[in-house]
Image: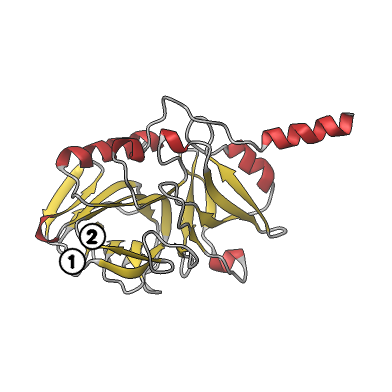
Amino acid sequence: MQRAFARTRRIISDIPAMSAPNYVGPGDLISGALGFWAFRAYSGATIGNPVVVLVRDSDLATRTFYSQSNGYLNLTEISNWGGAANLYVKQLYNQAASSPSLSHAIFVSPANDLPLYLTNALGTNPAAHYVTATGLQLDTSADIQSGGGNVTQNQPFNLLAVARRTGSLTTPNCIFGLGNAAVELYFNNSEAAIIISAGAVTCKIAAADNAWHAIQAVVNGASSVIGADGATVTADAGAANISAQLLVEGRTAGVDSLTGDVIELGLWPGPAWNATQIAAMNGNQRGSWSF
């Protein structure tokens, strides 16, 4: 009887907590995202859903972790499971839809192929830590609309991210990219700035290195907007669309690898966000991660 009771307790402890009425995610502000990959819930309605799959390097065990009643991960649970081992991010679930995840399904070793699960990256919050060739990409077995792991979305479309660059300050560091590099959200190579490019490199905003930034981007030709931490710049980002391309976090087209950290990444279709919506997203990002 005692053993049966202990087993019951373990099973119950693995059941994710359900929704919290006070949590507000980006999906509560603007619904309809094509993808949201983050260390928190997309919306109050998605609390309790899977967030991330981690790999423990000591034995290559994997485990899925869920958002809890406050909208975030149970960091103590993750720490207890990891113990003294290093943890790596194998998969970030798309919390805005049933598919696709950002993942690196096949890897030789976690340290060489996967982003590190970085603890206390922003306060006590975790992040995916990227170095050369450790990007996560869309599952090849699933897609957002159609195309076997690829994304198709014409302008206008909208992006958000919470990220920082911590090294390789004189090279492009890609936060969001495509297999053909037609659209990139990246830290510039010649200055401390973030650029949203869909063929042009003029839509940019100052952003200090080694610092966290709440980023919003509206890709809409000559009326494109790049926002960071409450400031915005309107300029021409170019005319490229996302046309049956693989979406990648942490690099693009196999190059422009990010040396730095990402906490969340999201993609919304048009219409183009207006100034009020951009400000609301910025407030939600900074408030949620307390910076």
Residue occupying the far top of the picture = 22
- Type of colouring: secondary structure
**Circles 1 and 2: CB distance less than 8 Å?**
yes
Residue occupying the far right of the picture = 1
Vertical position of residue 264 compared to residue 74: above or below: below
Q: Which mark is residue 113?
A: none
Task: Name the amino acid type tagged 1.
Answer: Val
Identify the image quadrant of residue 221: bottom left
Residue 270 in the image, given as x and y percentages of width and height: 22, 52
- Residue at left offset 16%, top offset 57%: 220
Mark 1 or mark 2: name the one nearer the start of the chain. Answer: 2
Looking at the picture, tell me which residue is in the foreground, 152 or 117: 152
Q: Which mark is residue 201?
A: 1
**For the residue labelled by badge 1, is the local secondary structure a helix, a strand or a loop?**
loop
Residue 135 in the image, given as x and y percentages of width and height: 45, 65
Quadrant occupied by the C terminus = top left
Q: Which residue is mark 2?
A: 195
Task: Name the amino acid type tagged 2.
Answer: Ile
Q: On the rendered structure, is 198 left or right of 285?
A: left
Q: On the rendered structure, is 41 left or right of 11?
A: left
Count of all numbered marks drawn on residues in the image: 2
Identify the image quadrant of residue 154: bottom left
Looking at the picture, tell me which residue is in the foreground, 266 or 214: 266
Would residue 149 be visible to someone looking at this image? yes
Residue 122 in the image, given as x and y percentages of width and height: 44, 42
**How far, Cα to Cα, is label 1 from label 2?**
7 Å
- Residue at left offset 19%, top offset 46%: 273
- Residue at left offset 48%, top offset 68%: 140
Vertical position of residue 20 compared to residue 143: above or below: above
Residue 119 in the image, given as x and y percentages of width and height: 54, 46
Quadrant occupied by the N terminus = top right
